[in-house]
Each structure stands twice: as structure tokens, then as C-alpha cells.
Amino acid sequence: MKGVETYNVGYVSSGSPHVWTDFSYENEYRDSYLHHGISNDSGGNYGFEFYNWNSRHKVENNIIRDTRHSIAFEGGGSGNAILYNYTDDNGESIQGQGNTYDTSFLGEDAIINHGSHPYMNLWEGNSVTSYWSDYTQGSASHNTLFRNHVRGNNTTLTLDSNPWLWVCVEIEQYNRYVNLVGNVIGNSSFTTGTVVCNSSNCGATKPYIYRFGYSSSGGSYSDSASYSTAILQGNYDYVTDGVAAWADSDHTLANSLYYNSQPSWWTNGIPWPPIGPYVTGQVNDIPAKVRYTTPRPSAPTGLRIIQ
């Protein structure tokens, strides 16, 4: 699938994604634009949704906006690469109110896990609002987030002045061995916050850069192993305005875990790699974001229709 635009998908509660993949192997989805839906109630208006067993898919250089969740693994899947996608203004509705967004919390944007048991998937170079590995329908393990920008905000779906939940990376209970390496988390508007929440009493200082071990977004703390099995290596955050922790003494990060060198499709003028603690300014716009924000040419004038 290449160069496809999907818009205003319908709604049924059992599932209404723009692109639904089920029991499939080695597909590629790239250079596309998925946006808007009839309703952002539960089950509706997902961007890319992967159900049941899936393996060796590549999801690359797409734009996903105004959906409930941009990319979600609803069940098991392994060996997939989710690379350099731009997601924004994705959010959950107040249940039963269609497109009336719930701005009391930062919704689940890119979902590592929304069903049992995705593992050994690579998320690299994406620009997303948030990452969640939840426990709604099961666990996950051994997934890697590498050199992503997790912004912690949307462009137009602004949060309430005191959101009850504001977390950039959520790793819920029974999710194990997540590798968080070389990411940039937050944005320059963060003036306060908590880097790691991994207890029943994280305090009221939001946003949270990471939250581990909770039973659900509105649940309680129940699992210490979600944090103790995780690797946090060289992630830059905007609460400390630096790297809060290195897992070991080796601070050298690969440019990519997928490519040996800059890919041939990469846009000229954009640094490679675009994101990371040692990149100048930490974050550069990836090609998908540049493609979205670049003004389109004006329509030609002076045309007439010949019938």
C-alpha cells in the first residue's frame, strides 16, 4: 500500500480502522495519509490496526491524524518495523459523543500493545503524541522504541488546564522488557513534571515522562516488574532538559536499528538521524511531517471547462 489517502471512515463498535490487517505476513504500508472518522468512540476510527497474528510488516513514512489511535497492535505480532511516521491530533472521544474529544487526559496515540502478545517489534524515528503498552486485552514484551520523538501534546487538541492524566510513555502491568533507547520525550513547553512514575504515589506533578505498572489509565499501581525489566538508555526528556539515565556506560547509539545508512527515499536537507540526545537540537522534523506541513501549490487560475 503506497500513496493512499483514506478519509472519514465509518463506525461500528466491533472495529472501524482505516487499514485493518489480520493474520498476515510481510506487508508494506508507506507514504500514505490516514485521517478523520465518523466517531472516535471505543473501537472506531483507528489508523493502522493489526489483529491477531502478524509478522514482518513495515509501516513507514505515513501521516495519521484525527483518529482515535494512530497505530495499534490489537493482538500478537512480532518482527514488525514501524518507522518514521508522523501522528498528530489523535484522541479519544467522550464515550457516546462521537467526535467530542475528551481533553481531560492525553489519549493513547501509538499503541505498542492493545491485545496479547506483541513482541520484538521495532518502533523507530516516529513523531507521536504518546506511546502506550496497555493491558486492555493482554500483555506484551521485548518491544523496542528507538530514536522517536514522543511529544506529549497535540497541535490542536489541547488538554485541560489540569488534566487528570498526562503521560508520554505508559507501560502498564504485565508488559515486560520494553527497550526505550535514544528517544526524545516531551517538548520545550514542559517547565515541570515527573520523569519516572513507578509507584502508587507518583504525586501530582505532571506530565509524567514514563509511567510503569498501572492496571489501566484510570487504574491503580500493581506491577513493579514493568519497570524493573525495562531498559532506559539515553533518552532525552524535557523535564530535566537532558538525559536522566543511562542503562550502562556505553553511550554510543546507532543511527538506526533498521537501516545501515540513510535510506534512498529520505528528504534532502533533513539530518540523518533526525532524532536523538546527541542530534543538534535533539529533534528535526521527519519527512512525513514536512510533507504534511509544506503548503500545497495553489490551483491554477484562468481555466475553463470545455464540454
Image (tube, rainbow, N blue to C red):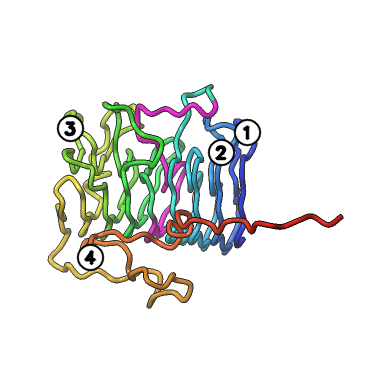
Q: How crowded is mark 1: few (under 14 residues within 10 Å), some or many (20 or more)?
A: some
Residue ID for mark 2: 45
Q: Do the residues labelled 3 and 4 touch (CB within 8 Å)?
A: no
* Residue ID at (24%, 55%): 231
Q: Are marks 2 and 4 in contact (CB under 8 Å)?
A: no
Residue ID for mark 3: 205
Discs 3/4, front? 4
* Residue 175 image point, x, y percent: 34, 45
CA gap, disc 2 and disc 4: 36 Å
CA gap, disc 3 and disc 2: 32 Å
Instruction: Specify whether residue 72 is in view.
Output: no
Q: Is residue 59 left or right of residue 271?
A: right
> Which amino acid type is shown beneath numbered disc 2?
Asn
Q: Residue 46 carries which label?
A: none
Q: What's drawn in magenta, residue-wise? A: 98-126
* Residue ID at (25%, 43%): 210
* Residue 276 image point, x, y percent: 26, 62
- Split into 4 quadrants, where in the image is the N terminus? bottom right
Which residue occupies the foreground of this view, 158 or 115?
158
Q: How crowded is mark 4: few (under 14 residues within 10 Å), some or many (20 or more)?
A: few
Residue ID for mark 4: 280
